Amino acid sequence: MAHGVFHKELGAINLSELDLNVREDRLLWESLYGKTVKGDLECLECRENDPGCPRWMFLRLWKGRPVAVHYSTGIRHASQPESPRHRALKERIARAAETAGFSADLEACGPDGRRRTDVLVHGENGLQLGCEVQLSYETAPAVVKRTDIARADGLSPLWTTDDRSAPLIERAPWARIDRLPLEAFSAGNALLVRGGVKDLKLKKCDSHNPLPCPDRGYGRCNQWHGTWAPTLGMHLDRLIAATAAQEYVPLYVPAQPGRRNRASHLWVTAQDHERYLDATSDTLAEPEPGNVDDHDPADPTRIPLSRACSYQQRQEDVERRGRTPRDTTALLPAGITLPHPSEPVPPPAQPVALPAPSAPTQAARPGGAAHTLPPQRSGPATPSPYPPPPASRPDSTPPAVRTAPRPQQDRRAAAVRLGCATEQVGPCASCRELAHRYGPGGNPLCAACRGRLPGC
């Protein structure tokens, strides 16, 4: 892997100077990326003196940076044996599926031999859940390729990792657990799912919300905004059983300029999935085959052009650059706004009216007899130790009655009367009459309320 390469027509190219956010550099990169054949690009070091490493190179994106990589088709490395942790986690997933009443196959091969799934769970209604355990590093194109093959075979993939910076995060349906020793997998310890599973939370945009309306950017709209929040208390065993029973389903949310910086793969409940589809206008589908969802170009490194070949230092480069966390456990805006939640909000508790003390009260007992409270004794009233409440002054203003905000046409008329924009009109914090509340010169109180309060 190197950032300098020799093109047979363009000469030496310093890939570290390419800024994919600049149009000229992006056009140059698009004219070369994926359009060169073996023999078009050469290693600068091998061109002058062949040290024994492969000579021809091709281009690729590595962590968002353009790099050149050697062809290694003539080199065959023995496949690494399966680690004990990988094998123990596979058996744990299969055991969780069988405990929930589903059958599971280990190392299930595809009909054409291109696929070998770690654990294949046979779920409800013919669902084939392909569980992949990925505890080692795997590149994003390799993850996307294996996911596409699984989907082509009719499988619903589920990737499990213990690395916050794994490239498979948000590029395939995923679940992240803690990095635990081998004994935790085999002893039956609870494996908490830290990422990849989310719940749809609705929060009302009113005066109790400290943040402005996400749709307008100011004020409050008194509607409900949706947010995807991490599911708390989910265990991996429970997730395997729930996905096999189709209680949790995958949801792919594509990236959209100005709304979502990157695409996301989520596991959500079937109810949240339906509520989201009913409330959004997005066209949701699975990503296109081969789409890596890696459109986050990194800043150019501006490294001086070097003829040194870093082919043997690839693993060190992977360890150095693979520590940027992709799973930030942050809230994900759902991008939906509802006038009211689908589930009714319970009304506030009303105070219970007590009976008058002067009238006797009949209370039925379980046995059927009635109990009569003794009547209040007549006589002079006992003086209260507390002072009586102050009498209201005759010139005091009665409390204002809170009314609902006026319709939109009243807001326009109020804006003309107040000499401000329509979006700057809002209800007075005291009497709820429309006033110039937002923007320059705005005030939470109307002019009448400010006149009644000293200092306003």
Image: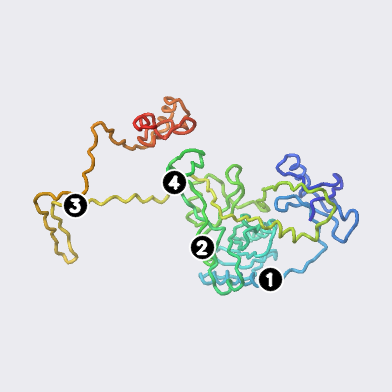
CB-based contact (under 8 Å), mark 3 and mark 4 = no
Kindly report the distance in space between the C-alpha atoms of the residues bearing marks 2 and 4.
26 Å
Instruction: Name which residue type carries label 1.
Output: Glu
CA distance separating discs 4 and 1 = 50 Å
Q: Residue at x 24, y 37 (%)?
A: 392
Answer yes or no: do the residues labelled 2 and 4 have beta carbons within 8 Å?
A: no
Q: Are marks 1 and 2 in contact (CB under 8 Å)?
A: no
Select label 3 or label 4 by which is in front.
3
Q: Is residue 90 left or right of residue 37?
A: left
Q: Quadrant of the N terminus?
A: bottom right
Q: Amino acid at mark 3?
A: Pro
Give left or right: position of 17 versus 398: right
Q: Which residue is mark 3?
A: 355
Question: Mark 4 and 1 residues: CB-CB less than 8 Å, in contact?
Answer: no
Which is more foreground, mark 4 or mark 1?
4
Q: Nearer the viewer, residue 241 or 449?
A: 449
Query: Circle 1: is it few (<14), some (14-19), or many (20+) Cα within 10 Å?
Result: few
Q: Viewer-proximal residue, 295 or 143?
A: 295
User: Is label 2 in contact with label 3 (beta carbons under 8 Å)?
Assistant: no
Which residue in the protein does label 1 denote?
A: 82
Q: Which residue is mark 2?
A: 234
Q: Position of residue 181 (x, y in %)?
A: 61, 70
Labelled disc at residue 205: none
Q: Earlier in the sequence, mark 1 or mark 2?
A: 1
Q: Secondary structure at mark 2?
A: loop
Q: CA distance from mark 3 to mark 1?
A: 76 Å
Residue bearing the label numbered 4 = 204
Q: Earlier in the sequence, mark 3 or mark 4?
A: 4
Neighbourhood count class around disc 3 (C-alpha, 10 Å): few under 14, some 14–19, many 20 upward: few
Mark closer to the chain start, 3 or 1: 1
Are discs 3 and 1 less than 8 Å apart at CB?
no
